[in-house]
Amino acid sequence: MSNLLELEGTWEEIVAYSEKLAGHRVRVIILPDKPQSLSTETPTPLIHSTAESLLKYAGTWEGDDVEECLQLVYDTRGQIEL
């Protein structure tokens, strides 16, 4: 197993993978029985905007740190598996 494998389920469901997991390091986290909701309020619907609609907030910007900002993005980005 070269990639991380994430399993979620009851203990009985996880044990079904015991042969595949044998000999590997694992981490076990005990979750609450019921998912905890963050809020009982109805979420605010997402509002889609375009770059043009955001320009009124841009103002004028002058700077010479574009390369530095780009490097920060490269240095701090992570991998994602979809």
Image: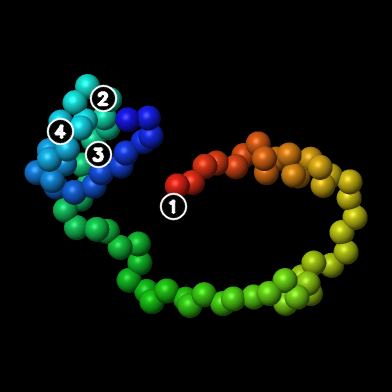
Compared with 35, 31 (above or below) is above
Residue closer to the observer: 1 or 41: 1
Query: Could you say which quadrant of the image residue 53 lies in?
Result: bottom right
Compared with 35, 15 (above or below) is above
In the image: residue 73, left or right of residue 79: right
User: Do the residues under discs 4 and 3 have CB atoms within 8 angstroms?
Assistant: no
Q: Position of residue 61 (x, y in %)?
A: 87, 59
Residue in the picture at 26% in, 30% down: 26
Q: Position of residue 56 (x, y in %)?
A: 79, 74
Q: Position of residue 37 (x, y in %)?
A: 30, 63
Q: Is residue 11 among the parts visible in the rendering? A: no
Q: Nearer the viewer, mark 2 or mark 3?
A: 2
Residue closer to the observer: 32 or 74: 74
Residue designated by label 2: 24
Q: Earlier in the sequence, mark 4 or mark 3?
A: 4
Q: CA distance from mark 4 to mark 3?
A: 16 Å
Residue designated by label 1: 82
Residue in the picture at 25% in, 39% down: 29
Residue designated by label 3: 29
Type of amino acid at the residue the image marks with label 2: His
Q: Quadrant of the N terminus?
A: top left
User: Do the residues under discs 1 and 3 have CB atoms within 8 angstroms?
Assistant: no
Q: CA distance from mark 4 to mark 2?
A: 10 Å
Residue designated by label 4: 18
Residue closer to the observer: 44 or 81: 81
Q: Secondary structure at mark 2?
A: loop
Q: Secondary structure at mark 4?
A: helix
